[in-house]
């Protein structure tokens, strides 16, 4: 083990000799080769001897510039002993002048790169460019700037270890005490339109993550800053001499590693997707990292004794995908854990419909859904959606897929419960894609607590992640719509076009109801639904009970096939007066279901697509 350490140290020193001397001379190469061989036996002493011989044989023209740049006092070790240095390399240059002034006032020498150095110079600040520090020019179109011992040695050296400090002094390297770095805008680049693969690759930062990780590792001696919002607190700590606060430095180090980790996850996600030219990979990767950003701390979880927080998914796949996570809240109490779940269920459901639609949700299940024609107002859709189950609608979430105007807002504010005609309906949340100015003003007057959200339509093609004990389940989102299916007639009774429309509407509602799910619908409105029951018969009974007499002549949809028909759900539906049943089919007793429908003169449609929702 000791020999392995000695060899690594010797090779590192050999590398520094190679970069700092004119080793292209044959005499120099022979000295270095001999030193390399002897390092396996004699350790670094032979390499140091080789360095001394190289120094005597090299011209002052080579050696002098390094000494002059590495130490403002032109003597070995002066930088590490007497001058505080801050290295700044930023893509996000917010608050840069605040940072530069604060560090300058504290006596820090500013070391910088590329565009950051230019910005500082234009603002009137004295800057040492990193190539002056390294005595090596930026090269390979900027790919190599900071990957140098003069930079990383100054960051990684432990101040409490004498050998580290002696090594810096020996090589004329100064300590770097503050590292302020954030990374190339890879995320924003690859999520913009028409970005080719080469452009994406060139926006993968290498030097930045290396400096961030180095500084975070040595956070006891180096303060690492990746977030412009932290500049004021960092400067305050430095000004008051409280910069040795261990917990503060560790928090900055955590943030640095998290910053680099999220960055790397975006690169990995993008590269996995673009393995082949002109073709995007759709297969699930063998390893997956999901970058999450804290959006808010919640009062509690599903229950008051559970802690909770809300995180936004910053995966590339979620960019521009819409949904509740990126919704804007205009009014009301802060969102709760259950609010997010219910709002998400309502919004995902209402976004499925092409015509103007209102969806009312309670405990993530749609208890009322109604659509109107393209040229009709949403007023009637709202009323019909509430009337489907006014008891459940009270305290629920109301979602619309078109703008809420003044007329609709007034109706929401004043509408009385159909159960007694007196009680004003109460809602937790209203969510829509937009509001007129007057409509928003009126809604705000309904209640101080009413949460009013504006959300972007949920896009299709998303992934679905769900946690189980010790793991996660990943699947494609359930994006099938009636237009994707055949609704194949399997009975002797052929339904009318109006009944087919009713069946498709019921089926689309049923897709968003918890299994076992049954929905009864007619004329583009839900009449009743049964959800979450361990058996399909019970779900049917609940749906028919809610629909009442309106079930006669209506359509019924089931999220999965009927395992039995006679004296079971299918026959019960036929006896209740349902005129068409839509189900996936696939049961070994499908023929029983068909025969039962034929007996009662009911049409049956097979969708051949199941919609379980657990």
Image (cartoon, rainbow, N blue to C red):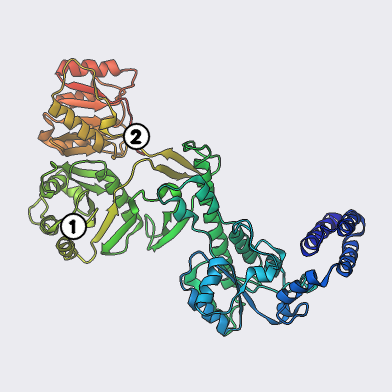
Using the rendered view, name the quadrant where residue 152 is placed.
Answer: bottom right
Image quadrant containing the N terminus: bottom right
Q: Position of residue 43 (x, y in %)?
A: 89, 60
Q: Earlier in the sequence, mark 1 or mark 2?
A: 1
> Residue at image x 52%, y 37%?
276
Q: Position of residue 489 (x, y in %)?
A: 22, 20
Vertical side of 363 occupied by 206: above or below: below
Q: Position of residue 450 (x, y in %)?
A: 23, 61
- Give the residue furthest to the left: 421
Vertical side of 29 occupied by 373: above or below: above
Label 1 crowding class (10 Å Cα cut-off): few <14, some 14-19, many 20+? many
> Residue at image x 64%, y 71%?
222
> Closest to the observer: 349 or 519?
349
User: Dot 1 corresponds to which residue?
Assistant: 426
Q: Does any portion of residue 306 appear in the rendered image?
A: no
Q: Secondary structure at mark 1?
A: loop
User: Dot 2 corresponds to which residue?
Assistant: 612
> Closest to the observer: 282 or 550?
282
**Tags 1 and 2 in contact by the CB under 8 Å rule?**
no
Vertical side of 228 occupied by 340: above or below: above
Q: Position of residue 147 (x, y in %)?
A: 66, 61
Q: Secondary structure at mark 2?
A: loop
Using the rendered view, name the quadrant where residue 566 is placed.
Answer: top left
Image quadrant containing the C terminus: top left
Mark 1 to mark 2: distance in Å? 31 Å
Q: Does any portion of residue 328 appear in the rendered image?
A: yes
Is 549 left, or right, of 562 in this rendering? left
Say the numbered circle drawn on residue 320. Answer: none
């Amino acid at each position: 083990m000791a020999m392995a350490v000695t060899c690594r140290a010797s090779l590192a020193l050999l590398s520094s000799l190679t970069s700092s001397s004119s080793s292209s001379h044959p005499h120099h190469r022979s000295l270095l080769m001999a030193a390399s061989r002897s390092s396996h036996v004699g350790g670094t002493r032979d390499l140091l001897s080789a360095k001394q011989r190289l120094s005597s044989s090299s011209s002052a023209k080579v050696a002098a510039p390094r000494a002059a740049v590495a130490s403002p006092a032109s003597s070995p070790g002066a930088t590490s002993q007497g001058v505080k240095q801050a290295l700044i390399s930023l893509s996000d240059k917010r608050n840069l002048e605040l940072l530069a002034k604060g560090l300058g006032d504290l006596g820090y020498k500013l070391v910088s790169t590329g565009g950051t150095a230019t910005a500082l110079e234009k603002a009137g600040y004295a800057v040492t460019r990193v190539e002056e520090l390294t005595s090596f020019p930026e090269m390979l179109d900027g790919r190599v700037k900071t990957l140098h011992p003069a930079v990383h040695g100054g960051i990684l050296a432990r101040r409490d270890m004498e050998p580290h400090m002696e090594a810096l002094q020996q090589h004329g390297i100064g300590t770097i005490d503050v590292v302020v770095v954030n990374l190339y805008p890879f995320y924003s680049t690859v999520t913009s339109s028409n970005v080719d693969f080469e452009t994406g690759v060139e926006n993968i930062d290498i030097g930045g993550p290396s400096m961030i990780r180095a500084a975070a590792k040595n956070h006891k001696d180096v303060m690492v800053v990746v977030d412009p919002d932290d500049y004021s607190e960092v400067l305050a700590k430095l000004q008051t001499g409280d910069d040795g606060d261990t917990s503060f430095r560790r928090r900055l180090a955590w943030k640095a590693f998290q910053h680099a980790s999220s960055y790397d996850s975006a690169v990995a996600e993008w590269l996995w997707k673009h393995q082949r030219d002109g073709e995007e990979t759709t297969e699930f990767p063998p390893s997956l990292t999901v970058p999450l950003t804290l959006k808010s701390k919640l009062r509690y979880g599903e229950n008051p004794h559970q802690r909770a927080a809300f995180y936004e998914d910053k995966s590339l796949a979620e960019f521009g995908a819409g949904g509740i996570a990126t919704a804007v809240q205009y009014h009301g109490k802060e969102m709760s854990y259950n609010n997010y779940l219910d709002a998400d269920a309502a919004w995902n459901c209402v976004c499925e419909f092409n015509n103007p639609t209102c969806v009312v949700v309670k405990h993530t299940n749609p208890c009322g859904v109604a659509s109107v024609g393209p040229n009709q107002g949403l007023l009637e859709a709202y009323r019909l959606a509430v009337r489907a189950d006014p008891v459940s609608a009270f305290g629920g979430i109301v979602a619309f897929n078109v703008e809420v105007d003044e007329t609709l807002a007034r109706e929401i504010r004043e509408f009385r419960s159909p159960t007694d005609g007196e009680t004003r309906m109460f809602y937790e949340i209203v969510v829509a894609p937009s509001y007129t100015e007057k409509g928003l003003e009126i809604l705000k007057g309904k209640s101080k607590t009413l949460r009013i959200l504006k959300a972007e339509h949920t896009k299709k093609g998303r992934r679905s992640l769900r946690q189980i004990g010790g793991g996660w389940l990943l699947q494609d989102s359930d994006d099938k719509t009636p237009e994707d299916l055949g609704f194949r007639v399997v009975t002797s009774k052929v339904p009318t076009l109006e009944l087919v429309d009713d069946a498709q509407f019921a089926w689309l509602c049923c897709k968003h109801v918890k299994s076992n799910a049954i929905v009864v619908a007619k004329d583009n409105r839900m009449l009743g639904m049964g959800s979450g029951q361990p058996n399909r018969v019970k779900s049917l009974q609940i749906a028919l009970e809610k629909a009442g007499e309106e079930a006669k002549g209506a359509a019924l949809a089931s999220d999965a096939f009927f395992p039995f028909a006679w004296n079971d759900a299918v026959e019960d539906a036929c006896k209740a007066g349902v005129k068409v049943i839509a189900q996936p089919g696939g049961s070994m007793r499908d023929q029983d279901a068909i025969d039962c429908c034929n007996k009662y003169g009911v049409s049956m449609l097979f969708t051949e697509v199941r919609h379980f929702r657990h």
